[in-house]
Structures are given as structure tokens and as C-alpha cells.
Amino acid sequence: MKPMVLDVYCGAGGCTKGYQRAGFYVVGVDIHPQIHYCGDEFIQDDALHFLDTADLSRFAVFHASPPCQHFTHMLNHGMTDRGKHPDLIDATRQRFNATRKPYVLENVPGARRKLVHPLLLCGNMFGLRVYRHRLFEISSKTFVFGHPHVKHREKIVHAGIAPRQNEFYCPVGHLADQAGSQRAMGIDWMQGQYEIAQAIPPAYTEWIGRQLFREVQG
């Protein structure tokens, strides 16, 4: 039987898909219904409530992508009210630590001070046509970071504009080229623009997951 990952705040499953490709069976939990979720099982529940009440013993690895709106740079442009969006990183980490198993916490660069020794991943490291910077706090003691963050050379266009051939996508908000945004992030199962705008490229957690898979397999 495949080792299991619990992916809380899973959304439509960008991170889930990466763990699946790395060899895991993935159970997703989200407070909202996710009709396009790609994982092996989906449970609609509040993430912290699930972590407090469910039997977590069957999971080998835990992943969380707590809501990022509290930390997003959009706050600086008046597009998001921080007070309306909770910071759930500490509460989630506390529950993960209680399991004494490997965990991953993902969030936007604005959350750097909240995360412990986070690794920065960028789409350019994986040959994707997005930059999509995300930070990952990884509890594993054997994890090896092997992807240098290379200099950005291609121009990124503003959201709502379809890039030309030598430009990178910015898949947030309104997507002028939804199909192209999906291809740029390596996603082919999501449908709505909101799902894509909130998603993490699966290549990130596939790379992380392959190392964690070797660890949990012994």
C-alpha cells in the first residue's frame, strides 16, 4: 500500500498532484467543496478541526497550504484587508508537530518571517513558464535542497494579459489566457479561473515528495 499524505487547505489539489506523482496516496481536506479535486480522497471540513478530531495515525506525511491572503503582497496595494484573513500557520504547525512525523508548510514569500528556514521554489527551476515563488518549511532532517534559484530573464506580464512567446504568465485574478495559464503551471484538471489562480504548480511538491517518499520508505 502506498504511504499516505494528508493535504489540508488543499483547494483543487495543485500540491496534491505533486505528491501523487511522487508515489503517495493523498487525502485532501478543505472547508469548501472542491469538485475538481484530483486526490485519492476528499473530506470537506475545517482543517484545524480535522487535525484535532481525526485519527491521524494512518498518514506518513502532512502538508498544509494555509490561506495566504494574510501575507500576500496585494495588501500593499490595498487589494486585500489583512484583518479579514486569519494567520493559521502557527496553529497548523503546532498540530503537525504533535504527530512527530514529517510535514511541509507552504505559503507566499510574504510569510517568510512566520516559517522556519523555508526553501524558495520558483517555476523557472522546473522549466515552467511561470515564476510563482512559494516558500516551503520542511521538517525533514534528511531533506537536501538541490534547486538553485536562477536569475529571471523572461519578462512576466501583468495579470489579465496574454503573454507573447518569450514572456511568462502571471496566473492571478482574471486570466486572459486560461488554457495557457494551465499549461504554464503544469495543470490540466482545474476548470475555473479562481482554482488556477490559487494553485501551486505540482512540480514543486513532486520534487519535495520524492525526497520524503524515500525517507518514509526507510
Image: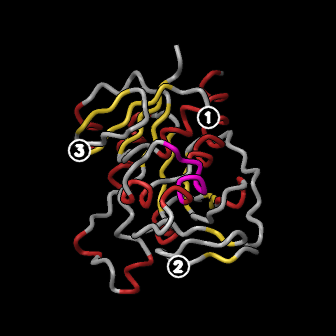
- Type of the residue with mark 3: Asp
- As helix, strand or loop, the secondary structure at mark 2 comes to loop
Looking at the image, tell me whether mark 2 or mark 1 is earlier in sequence order. 2
Looking at the image, tell me whether mark 3 or mark 2 is earlier in sequence order. 3
- As helix, strand or loop, the secondary structure at mark 1 comes to helix
Query: Cα distance, mark 3 to mark 2?
Result: 33 Å
The region drawn magenta spans 181-188
When asked about the image quadrant of residue 125, the answer is bottom right
- Type of the residue with mark 2: His
Residue displayed at 76% across by 72% down? 151
Say which residue label 3 marks.
46
Locate residue 111, reporting x and y percent: 46, 67
Query: Cα distance, mark 2 to mark 1?
Result: 35 Å
How would you classify the magenta stretch by its main secondary structure?
A: helix
| Category of crowding for the residue at label 2, using alpha-carbon neighbours closer than 10 angstroms: few (below 14), some (14–19), many (at least 20) | some
Q: Nearer the viewer, residue 12 or 119?
A: 12
Looking at the image, tell me whether mark 1 or mark 3 is earlier in sequence order. 3
| Category of crowding for the residue at label 3, using alpha-carbon neighbours closer than 10 angstroms: few (below 14), some (14–19), many (at least 20) | some
**Is the residue 161 above or below the residue 50 in the image?**
below
- Residue 212 tag number: 1
- Type of the residue with mark 1: Leu
Q: Nearer the viewer, residue 181 or 142?
A: 181
- The stretch drawn in magenta includes residue 182: yes
Query: Cα distance, mark 1 to mark 3?
Result: 26 Å
The quadrant of the picture occupied by the C terminus is: top right
Locate residue 87, reporting x and y percent: 32, 63
- Residue 158 tag number: 2
Residue displayed at 60% across by 37% down? 209
- The stretch drawn in magenta includes residue 57: no
Locate residue 202, reporting x and y percent: 56, 45
**Is the residue 136 above or below the residue 149 in the image?**
above
Locate residue 110, reporting x and y percent: 48, 72
